[in-house]
Image: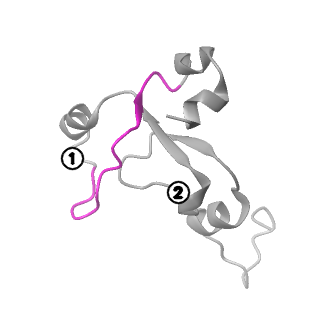
Amino acid sequence: MLRRGLSDCNPTRKDVALRYLKGAGIEIGALDYPLRCHAAHGFRYVDYLDELGLRQVHNVTLQEGRPLVVPDVVDDGARLELFSGSFANFFSR
């Protein structure tokens, strides 16, 4: 649908996420623009800095009036060393 560019179907990033993402998961680098998801699905947020660090580094790009998503875990999103253990244990915290 997205590749065809159908004019009558103009889904946004948020609409696609809400429709197709199911179950528990992580979002890396949400900042002030997280994917819209069902709250009951247990999403956790990962970023490379804590809240204060994100505010300092991204203060120019954070949209005024939008809340910053505070990361549940501070980790390198490329390596995700926190997953060296069990994925299931990550969501039981």
Name the residue rendered at 70%, 67% in the picture.
19
Placement of the N terminus among the 4 image quadrants: bottom right
- Region in magenta: 62-77
The three-letter amino acid code for the residue at tag 1 is Val
Direction from residue 67 to residue 25 in the image, left or right? right
Name the residue rendered at 42%, 55% in the picture.
33
Q: Residue furthest bottom?
A: 8
Q: Is residue 19 magenta?
A: no
Mark 2 lies on a secondary structure that is loop
Residue 35: image tag = 2
The three-letter amino acid code for the residue at tag 2 is Leu
Q: Residue 29 at x, y = what percent?
A: 45, 39
Q: Residue 65 at x, y = what percent?
A: 22, 65
Mark 1 lies on a secondary structure that is loop
Measured along the vertical axis of the image, is residue 72 above or below residue 12? above
Q: Which of marks 1 and 2 is in front?
A: 2
Residue 7: image tag = none
The image quadrant that residue 73 belongs to is top left
Direction from residue 71 to residue 34 in the image, left or right? right
Q: First in sequence: mark 1 or mark 2?
A: 2
Q: Which is more toward the observer, 48 or 1?
A: 48
Direction from residue 11 to residue 64 in the image, left or right? left
Q: Is the magenta stretch mostly helix, strand or loop?
A: loop
Name the residue rendered at 27%, 51% in the picture.
62
The image quadrant that residue 74 belongs to is top left
Direction from residue 68 to residue 16 in the image, left or right? right
Residue occupied by mark 1? 60
